[in-house]
Image (spheres, coloured by chain):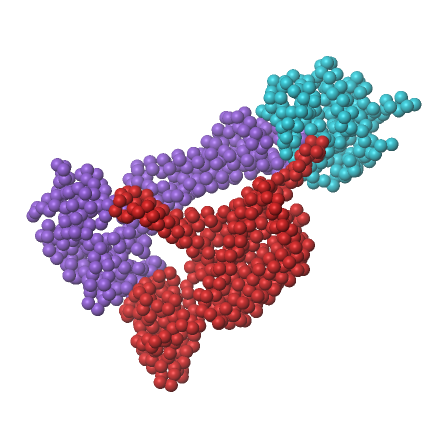
Amino acid sequence: MATLLKLIPHLFAWFGIVLIMLRGFSGRRSSVMLAGMIGFVIGVTGTFILFRSYPGSVTFGVVKSVLGMSFILLWGCSVVAIYRSTDRAKVMSWGKRLIKTPSTAIIASCLAGVGAGAVCTCRLSAATTDGVAMASVLLLLAAGAVAYIALAFEKRMPEAFKVSPAGMLAIVTALLLFSASSILRLDLFSPLSMKVMKGVHDFVHQFMESILIPDHLFVRSYIWKTIGLLFSKEVGFWGGMVIWFTPAILIVLAIQFERLPAVAHIRQGAQRRRVLVDAIRARRYRALIPVFALLLLAAATYQSCFPSVEYWDPKPLPVTAGSSGEIIIPKKGEINLEDGKLHKYIFRQGVKEARFFVLMTPAGELTVDLDACAICKPDGYGQAEGSVICYYCKTLIPLETVGKPGGCNPVPIPFTENGDSVVVDGLTLINSWSATVQATARVKEGGK
Amino acid sequence: MAELIIETTNLTRNYGDICALKPLDLQVPEGEWLTVMGHSGSGKSTLMNLVGGLDRPSAGSLQVGGKDLLAFTEDGLARFRREFVGIIFQQHHLVPYLTAVENVMLAQYFHSVPDEAEARSSLERVGLGHRLKNRPGELSGGEQQRVCIARAIINSPKLLLGDEPTGNLDQKSTLMVMELLKELRAEEKFTVIMVTHNQEVAAWGDRTIYLNDGMLVREESRLKVAEV
Amino acid sequence: MLFRILKNSFLKRPKAIFLIFLSIVMGSAVATAFLGIAGEISHKMALELRSYGANILIEPSAAEGGGFLRDEDLPKIKTVFWKYNITGFTPYLFGIAEFSAGGRKERGVVSGTWFTKQLEIPGEDVSILGIKGIAPWWEVQGRWPEDADEAMIGAALAKRLHIAPGGEVTAHVRVGMQKFRIVGVVTTGGYEEEQLFAPLVTVQSLLQQQGKVSRVQVSALTVPMDDFGKKDPATMTKEEYEKWYCTAYVTSVAKNVEEVMAGSRAKPIWQIASAEGALLKKLNSVMLLLTILALGASATAVSTSLMASMAERSPEIALMKAVGADRFQISAIFIGETLIISLAGGVVGYLLGNQLAEIISRTVFNSTIASPLWLFPTAIISALVVSIAGSITPLRRALLIEPVTVLKG
């Protein structure tokens, strides 16, 4: 239920996408609805299957590239739109005809559905590890309901509200990016600004090399300070901003540059002015959508710069010991132990159970620890940026020191690495859990 | 007979206990020049305001240009005024800090978009081509009234209302303004309703009605006389 | 056209416009100044309570007044129960010295410390300690000292000695003298600007205080103080004490550290500042209240002068209505007018308010103020809020004007 609540912003984005698509391809309500829904189902099931068959990073990579493609498409369209607005290219009219064909409407709404579905599924699997299938079904139902509400809403909207094709693309892309920005691993803005920063950096170095100046010897230090500005984080941020917002701004400008109707033939002044003002107003209405897209993109940037901190706290996976009493956890496979995240497991032996986790420290060493420390009630740990937090005493423990005993640090467990798996002795685990928990049991009773 | 542009039945307007306009039935065919005469306080300004959409009746029905003015909201009435009616005031009522041409453009702006060239040519048409950039304070009464006329007709209204347009003018200016109105009417074919005290001014119209104490007391038609 | 109307109406009524402008300037200047000072105060408080930076101070205990700590105890700090929460510490040894450079002589404090020191403790990981980690906000012009005879000088002292990185300073103390090469000038915003920082070992031998340390600053990752943490450990039940001890409150970490340093007393730094902090907090709320009052007053002033000009302009409004302006168009003219004035007023108010904040903080608080970036939008927004709040009633009055009653004849 809680995960469904987290989906609400994404469903809102889906609502917006359906609404805009219906209005943008006006007169093709049923085919747009159908294609959009089919696209959504394809997006959800496709991502679901990807998650099942490949590690998470691959799936996130795929979804991210899809989003990136839509952004590049938006760039292309915005450039075309601004070019057309200068009234120079009559050849481009085939594009206009293409947009009017029914197949374009179907393909576009299907693609938008795929994107929205994929992002929603990524959200689901980022939030939970099991029960994704069940949640996906619920998601599909919710998405269907939302789409129908959008359809009903669209029928009641005033006729004057019109969407230009470029505006439609802008808002759909913006909604998708906004929806993706709340998932850290799908966020596009921060990698974009990183790329810009690296690009500038490489360019400066290459430039220096190409004019055969060994840069650090000949250039004075204060000049380096100035050049150094180019390498700073700000350049990446502002450069990223420019790339991020330009297409939507171009589309707004293209709409503003659209020619007004020729009115010279209308003899009566009042009538002439009325035609003009109607055209201006219609243009303003059309610009509304890309302006809204700009706002959404800004919101996405904000979410990317100030991500809402959530403790990474996976549900413990049950594990069993082999005949020799050893628990073997593969390093790769469904779960990648070396991704720097907390991976929790629960081991049961008879009535006894022990909770532990495996984590790769920033130093690159694997460590296995109890999900409890030597002093606190065993409430367990969650992972935040650069540290883990003890839920009981809220103490932050730097990731570097996880795996070392003492303080409120999680109690380390001896383990061996056997090729591509981690081996823990089940008995040792149970014993040290019992010892630890017994020592802190007094607190357990006294607590709460 | 031409189509009716104004049609009222039992049109009444009370201000508190005072009855400014007693139930009035009036029909004005399109293109007519109607003069309303009467003493001050006889209800002629009230009739004017009601027809121009500046005021709302207390009772009765009021149809102007086929539209029921009672059904309009405040903003709807504003739209009706800017698209359908042009008004000429006795006191001219020009915005003091705007030039003649800007005063005309103001009406264009509220109607749709300002168009300076059109505003200029309309001032030239009323014979003020040489005083475009003057502010109202620098114009004579007759000139101000001509700016007012230019402003009233800039949006091609169907109905031109004049509330004693010549009340503040001398004989010569009065004659000029009336000539101008007659010319413009011939070109633009709008209906004129004009309130006046002046018998001579009334003679320019097709028909004259006399109000007394909010009641229609007498009606005479120049055309009908001529026809008869 | 809207622009022409606004321009002409500005030019035509400069006095009324100036009055409105003035009240908005006053409002936003006061808001800028007060919020700037309040923000600066919170900023300084936050710096002291910041999780990084030093939050525990170890001094020789009062019983052995004027004593010293021993530097062989220092590595023990990294072995205490809360060792993983101690992210850094740095020792200091202070001495009064006479500095001479280029013929100038000034008195000041010579301070021996660690800049970046690798500490190896058997059985523990190598850790890097020193000022650099504890005071990340120090701004160093030049570089940090590396060799034994290199030193870093506080900005205020450097100014008095007219010295820049690359110069030389000789420190004379009662028992000897030492030449230092200055490699950096440090700006800290505090008393440290009057000091000369040199490696601990060099200062120990200069002062002939081998192996001794005056105080230690410790920076620890702690849990924010809550009501439970403020309780006196002596009055706690056993369970409570357990929880208190195993929670990384700054007090419990301090107690932990104190246990391993012989003859020491460790106090959380916020305790030093807490009396001051409480006062500042009260001051802050007074400032906020004053800001709100000032904004309210200027909104009232705006409202009154707009009301007056509205009465004066009612024929004009009535005429616009008669010509066919709807409510939206009338509002656009008046709101546009106030928005332009308030934007201009906001900018001017911001500039004035900044100066005001500077004067206030110099005369009252005796400290400089760095105007934060968020003050500019705050000034503009407060100006807009003032003008919009002030123009609601006049605008409603304007929309109620009936052309019929105003335009008689």
| Residue A351: x %, y % from top left | 40, 82
**Residue A154 in view here:** no
Front-most of A280 and C370? A280
Q: Is residue B179 left or right of residue A207?
A: right
Q: Which quadrant is home to the N terminus of chain B?
A: top right
Give the drawing colour for chain A: red
Farthest bottom residue in view? A323
Report the residue at 90% width, 23% height from top. B227
**Residue A222 in view here:** yes
Give the drawing colour for chain C: purple
Give the drawing colour for chain B: cyan
Q: Is residue A273 left or right of residue A230?
A: right
Where, by quadrant of the figure, is residue B60 drawn? top right
Above/below status of B57 relative to C12: below
Front-most of C212 and C142? C142
| Residue A6: x %, y % from top left | 51, 62
| Residue C75: x %, y % from top left | 19, 62
Farthest right residue in view? B228
Report the residue at 61% width, 46% height from top. A91
| Residue A141: x %, y % from top left | 60, 66
Q: Is residue B218 left or right of residue C32?
A: right
